[in-house]
Amino acid sequence: MHNEDAGAGPEPSNASYFLIYGLILALIGAQVLVSMNSASIGGAAIYLNLLIAGAQACLLAYFFMHLKGADNLTWLIAGAGLFWIAIMFILMLNDYLTRQIAAY
Amino acid sequence: MSTDSSGVLCHHFDNIQQQQSAARMGMWLFLVTEVLFFGGAFVAYTAYRIWYPEAFLAGSSKLILGFAAINSVLLLTSSLTITFGIHAAHRGDEKMLKRFLLVTILLALVFLGIKAKEYYIDFQEHLIPGTLFITPVHEGHPSPAEEFEAMGVNPGHVQLFFMFYYCMTGIHVLHMIVGVGLIGWLYFLATRGYFKHKERFVYVEVTSLYWHFVDMMWFFLVAILYAAGPHKSLF
Amino acid sequence: MLVANIPILPERASEQAAQVDYLFYFISAVTGAGTLLVFLLLIGFCTAYRRKTMNDKTPRILGSHQLEIFWSATPLVLFLVMFAWGVVVFDQGFAAPADAPEIFVVGKQWMWKAQHPNGVREINELHLLINQPVKLTLISEDVIHSYGVPAFRDKIDVLPARYVTTWYNPNRAGSYHLFCDQLCGTGHSQMIGKIHVMEKADYDAWLEGKRPVKEGPTDGSLAWEGRQLFMKLQCSSCHNAKGRAPILEGIWGTTVPLKDGKTAIVNEGYIRESILHPKRKVHEGWEAIMPTFEGQLSDPTLGLSEEETLIRLIAFIKTLGPGQTPVRTEQFPPPIGAKTELGEKK
Amino acid sequence: MSTISALHTANHHAPSGPAAKTNYLTDGYSWKSWLLTVDHKRIGIMYLVSVTAFFLIGMAAAGLIRYNLISPSGMLTADQYNKVFTAHGIVMVFLFLVPVIPGVFGNFFIPIMIGAKDMAFPKLNLLSWYVYMAGAFFACYALLIGGVDTGWTLYPPYSTRSSTNVAPVAVAIFIAGFSSILTGLNIVVTVHRMRCPGMTWFRMPLFVWAMYATSLIMLLATPVLAVTVSLLAVERLAGIGIFDPKLGGDPLLFQHMFWFYSHPAVYIMILPGMGIISEVITCFSRKNIFGYKAVAWSSVGIAVVGFLVWGHHMFVAGQGYYSALVFSLLSMFVAVPSAIKVFNWSATLYKGSITFQAPMLYALGFIALFTVGGVTGLFLSTMGTDRHLHDTYFVIAHFHFTMVGGMVLAYFAGLHFYWPKMTGKMYSDFWSRIAAILMCVGFFMTFVPQFVLGYMGMPRRYHQYPPEWQVLNVLSSAGSTVLALGYLFPFTYLIHSIFAGKPAGSNPWGATGIEWTDTTSPPVTHNFEKLPVVTEMPYEYSLPTAPKPTFSYDLPTGDVAKEEHTHVH
């Protein structure tokens, strides 16, 4: 019990950090491009934007925050955060998406 | 407080791994609460975004995409430098640790400076919900409300967008300030030789977790606030 | 006996109320039985197994999967029955019959202003004809209120800037409580009133003294008041056959195309929105030239608030048939409340 | 800390036992040794003192509410009444019900129960108490400078228009919420990382399971409340905001976000109580808990499903029909784990060896009252009946049955159960039983009439009411005086016991669990002389190795019991 997670610690590899850094930089650029052209992209722009932000966040979490190589518990905690966010979004938007169909 | 000679291990832990993993887990749990905190604002935003898409896109177009992009790069770079800081602490290299922490703080301060400049520009353009929003910017120049009205967009809904813009970026700025405070505290500790014991790298690590999280939230704010609407130019 | 005089059940004045009662009794019976079971278990065990000596032997019982499943599944099935029945009862109170007359109710701190289709206005009271289903459309001028009538087992939160509806079919004559059920400020407990359900003769007698004008086209109805406002606010200068805006005859309930390619159903909400925010949902084929009427609709001299003006305009547009749009040659109408014979005949 | 030094003196004059070892109470007497302590037990005591103070304030407000309702035309002014019930709600919910068991028993007993020397983050633990006090300060400030009249639910647009002090209350709720986040975080990490050898997940006492589930809710729900009240405060200060219908904002959004926290929050309040009941019932019937895993998992089940049901507070508020449908259906599922717990507790009594000391009386009272409170919730989660019952006294009665009849009784069960461990002193057996019975009787008298009033349609938060309801209201007010009297008893005899109580011994109830078997009463500073090793399930009362009570039980023939007791040894 006490020694779970014992080995976790940073694994130094500057090159890989720079690689991820470059990737996220590229994504920032992509986001700017999407936004500048969102008039022609239309309704999909918001999904593209969120996709890019999600990818940036995943890269950060997986590499910079060391989810890679973290123990199950850390994954569980991160997963719980997403799960509860999902609860909130699904049940709340259920109202906002259907209220005009039927409400008092 | 401590039973071992170095003072690194607190009295109530059995070993250093237990102590480190507890610190890490504590920070992860705290970040989950932060996810829910920002999540509450995000879900509110989404509800209105579903109801009033045009107004939200129109409001977004008024924001300065270039500043957001620069700030993204700054924050990302600071994430990188604090990560290098962990490695320095892990090696017991206090000198490098201090340098990386200082760079991180500097990048954060530049970010905050740009944000302040941006708020100032918004203020000048009267992009602030309330009476300012319906007041002409200057003689002969229409108020934002009139401008949006002319575009066929409900100015009330645009004001809602700006409420989200100020609340969400404001919350984010507060998190940045807290983060700068934490990193400043680490820097102070480093000057006092606290990190001579490399086991204490974990405190840099948990602070970096928080910092990365603040970075992550910024990316989402850029996506839903700045990049959401069409922009003709960066500035 | 004193005890016999204490009411313990609310009066019941509609079929809907009876339906709620039956469901209530069902849930009471089921949960009462369950609670009784638990109480009997507690009392029985506590009596049978009270400690006799300090060295009592107790069996080492760890649990039973069968029992756990039994006492999880049985309640769940019963709960789901309650849910389903509850939905059925809720649905009955949900949508009014299409031909039910519509009464507008405006809530404000701290009174209820009711507006009958025939133009009768009431404050903190509502007179209803027995066995005549009515639809209520409610809106608040300030904060959230709630229109609750225990005798109808009905309650609906009344929101600012949004119309909500409910309906009643009263079946027993009498006077019943009306409460505001959502905390709305200092006078919350004073925001009460009476619902009077009346037999036909009584209702007619009551109406006799109330109706502003009895007959003719100038009947003083809510729609007629709306018509006067329609002219006073100059709506008719554009919304006419040759006008610069869509003609509103027969538009109620239809689905109209909008400029952005979407459609809108013409109902209370859409009309309200179009008057207050005309640029938001522009009818396809027309220019967005209409000015906003936000903040300009209340008329203290007529005693009308913005919401009260809006419900009159809505009532008018709702009844506006082909060829009934008032024409500009008509003399400007007198203020509402003055003699009403003017305006129409000239 | 005069009481503490008195305790110390009393310890020295204790007739039996060796010279007192240094326990957590005798480890320093200065103000500083308390206010800067990182000992979880001392922090627990600090919580005990502060929540008791707020309980008294909340009680006083409740007394005023019942006083007002004696007369149909009200005894207070409408404005005073609105402020009084708001104060009652805010103080009781945020300053008493939410922090009480996690703060007092969670802090004090979780580390001891799992065999740890302290919480994982002792300084954070102390900080959470200070943060709680800061929140309490803002709440009291708001109440003292004129109060708030929006109800504890703070619904906009009324809360943005009310001329009363909504902003300080929003700040208070935000800060108090932060404190409960810190407590929850500390408990979760402690349970995960600090368990002693042999303390596997399924050997943990059910109180720890319940606290773990509670902490999950604290962590996941509280931040949403924090952001909600922040947005409300912004709206109030700026005069414009996202819940403002004038801009096209939706007041129901506030209700959604508020109840996303506040519905799970009722489980924050009740779950720790359920944990305590599992401890007490087993101990006083000397039985293993019936269905350990079912009870443990039902705690987690309540924590998770409790997040899916908030919309049943909004059936008539104007939310969409399909939304109401989904929430009503999901609400039916959350009732199941609670039912499981009640049946398991009842089954635990079967073939037990039951005595009726105060903790057990409270626990039995809890089961009875909580059952009533639980089943009346079904009327409110069923859409058809909620339409009539929403915002009436039926709701008031329902949640007081769970929160007061349930949670507060459980708290008193815990207080009486653990008092000997926390102070080393035994209180009056007779008076404690009288108090327990008084509380149950007073409670029934107070709140059963409210069910009747509610079904007749009496709206909540009414300062005046139709005269035909006076009899029931007076009955309820009369009951509340009995209830208040019941509450005053423990204050008297518990404080008396600190000075004059008999030494309790390390395990008066003969309970299992390392908090009883492996440490003294009161526990030593780092909890254990020697770190415990756990080898069996909790609640092994039926095994011959189970500890025997040292408390002299008041069995029908008291002397016989003593004789038998000595006979056994």
Image: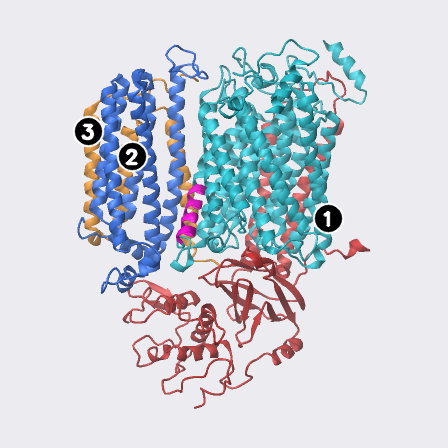
Chain colours: A orange, B blue, C red, D cyan
Looking at the rendering, the stretch of residues picked out in magenta corresponds to D224-238
Chain under numbered label 3: A
Residue drawn at x 61%, y 47% as measured from the top left: D396
Disc 3 or disc 2, which is closer to the eye? 3
Question: In the image, is residue B46 part of the stretch drawn in magenta?
Answer: no
What is the magenta segment's predominant secondary structure?
Answer: helix
Q: Give the SS element for disc 2.
A: helix
Q: Quadrant of the C terminus of chain C?
A: bottom left
Chain under numbered label 1: D
Can residue D343 be seen at all in this image of the molecule?
no
Q: Label 3, on which residue? A: A18
Q: Give the SS element for disc 1.
A: helix
Chain under numbered label 2: A
Residue D333 drawn at (x, y percent): 53, 41
Q: Label 1, on which residue? A: D475
Residue D469 drawn at (x, y percent): 70, 55
Residues C25 and D482: in front is D482
Q: Label 2, on which residue? A: A58
- Would residue B98 be found to the left or right of residue D2 on screen? left
Residue D354 drawn at (x, y percent): 71, 24
- Would residue C149 be found to the left or right of residue D135 on screen? right
- Is disc 3 in contact with disc 1, using a CB cutoff of under 8 Å? no
Can residue A48 be seen at all in this image of the molecule?
yes
Mark 3 crowd level (few <14, some 14–19, many ≥20, 10 Å Cα): few
Mark 1 crowd level (few <14, some 14–19, many ≥20, 10 Å Cα): some
Measured in 3D between alpha carbons, the distance from the residue under mark 1 to the one under mark 2, in whole angstroms, is 61 Å
The label number, if any, that marks residue C252 in the structure image: none
Three-letter code, disc 2: Cys
